[in-house]
């Protein structure tokens, strides 16, 4: 890690910002002026997508709660209240034809709804499975592998449907673990690029809260409740906590 960087901000780059950077520039290769919809826009990966998307010259829309709307707006994005608005109808009202890309971390049937927000030839980048998890377990309350395999099968059908159905609206899977394993040089290259952006103060990770390691359980409970704006970080000493309060 380059010297002089805030440790909590730097560690946020390793997962959230690398994920966002690679989805933008590896999975779909966005271009200036394109329209994108980001689900969970006030969260860790969501806020990273907003900051990196602004640097890429994108027109952005983001689903969030009413509490997260000010953060999303401050990052140059039009917020859509997912609790009180139908994001598909709202996107078509705002854009007419739909967006070029949707970044969907929710999964399940939500992927197909995201596909409805696309213009012809658009892409849904699907990552994570937050809709299937609750408190570290499947939303159904069961933790069996059989249900996980069923979710993977459905996901595969969505990918196939994107190729077979009219409109050329594709579903593109993304996994940071897979890409890092298959192409480790790209992971290192992208992380170095992000460290440079952080040093230049062109990006600033949103730190929701810093917890000492002794309070890791509290951090997990807060994360499980949802609605967190930015990244929750565990730190090893008091100085790191103080730097976050400054």
Image (cartoon, rainbow, N blue to C red):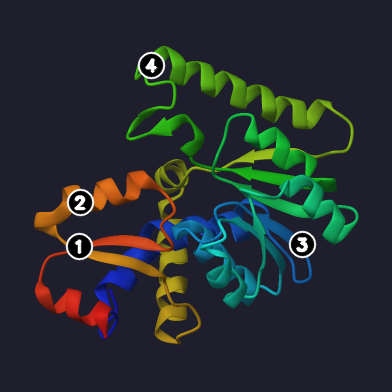
Work out whether 110 lies above or below 5.
Answer: above
The residue mark sitting in front, 1 or 4, is: 1
Label 3: how many Cα within 10 Å (few below 14, some 14–19, many 20+): many
- What residue is drawn where x is 40% and y is 62%? 188
Please report whichever mark, 1 or 2, sits nearer to the chain's N-terminal start.
Answer: 1
Mark 1 in CB contact with mark 2 (< 8 angstroms): yes
Q: Give the residue at mark 3.
A: 35
Distance Cα–Cα, label 1 vs label 2: 8 Å
Picture quadrant of residue 234 = bottom left
- In front: mark 2 or mark 4? 2
The residues tagged by marks 3 and 2 sit, at their Cα atoms, a distance apart of 38 Å
Disc 3 to disc 4: CB gap under 8 Å: no
Where does residue 238 sit, x and y in percent of width and height?
A: 10, 74
User: What residue is pinned by disc 2?
Assistant: 218
Residue 70 horizontal/vertical position (percent): 56, 72
Q: Residue at x 89, y 32 (%)?
A: 166
Residue 47 lies left or right of residue 157; in this view the side is left
Q: Position of residue 73 (x, y in %)?
A: 62, 73
**Which quadrant of the rendered structure holds the C terminus?**
bottom left
Label 4: element kind: helix
Query: Is residue 226 shown above or below 164?
Result: below
Q: Secondary structure at mark 2?
A: helix
Number of numbered discs: 4
Name the side, left or right, on which 81 lies relative to 149.
right
Contact, CB < 8 Å: mark 3 with mark 2?
Answer: no
Residue labelled with disc 4: 145
User: Which comes before the other along the chain, label 2 or label 4?
Assistant: 4
Q: CA distance from mark 1 to mark 4?
A: 32 Å
Mark 1, other Cα within 10 Å: few <14 / some 14–19 / many ≥20 = some
Report the residue that reaches farthest toward the top: 146
Residue 211 image label = 1
């Amino acid at each position: 890690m380059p010297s002089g960087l805030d440790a909590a901000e730097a560690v946020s780059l390793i997962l959230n910002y690398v994920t966002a950077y690679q989805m933008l520039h590896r999975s779909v290769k966005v271009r200036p002026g394109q329209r994108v919809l980001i689900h969970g826009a006030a969260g860790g990966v969501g806020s990273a997508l907003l900051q990196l998307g602004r640097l890429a010259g994108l027109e952005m829309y983001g689903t969030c709660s009413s509490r997260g709307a000010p953060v999303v707006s401050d990052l140059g994005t039009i917020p859509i209240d997912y609790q009180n608005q139908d994001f598909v109808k709202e996107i078509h009202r705002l854009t007419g034809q739909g967006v070029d890309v949707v970044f969907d971390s929710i999964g399940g049937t939500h992927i197909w709804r995201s596909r409805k927000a696309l213009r012809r030839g658009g892409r849904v980048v699907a990552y994570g499975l937050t809709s299937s998890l609750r408190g570290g377990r499947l939303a159904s309350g069961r933790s069996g592998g059989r249900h996980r395999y069923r979710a993977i099968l459905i996901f595969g059908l969505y990918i196939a449907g994107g190729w077979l159905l009219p409109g050329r609206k594709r579903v593109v899977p993304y996994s940071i673990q897979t890409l890092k394993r298959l192409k480790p040089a790209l992971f290192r290259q992208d992380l170095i690029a992000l460290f440079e952006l952080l040093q230049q103060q062109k990006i600033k990770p949103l730190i929701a809260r810093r917890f000492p390691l002794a309070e890791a359980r509290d951090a997990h409970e807060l994360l499980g409740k949802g609605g967190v704006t930015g990244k929750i970080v565990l730190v090893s000493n008091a100085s790191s906590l103080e730097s976050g309060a400054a």
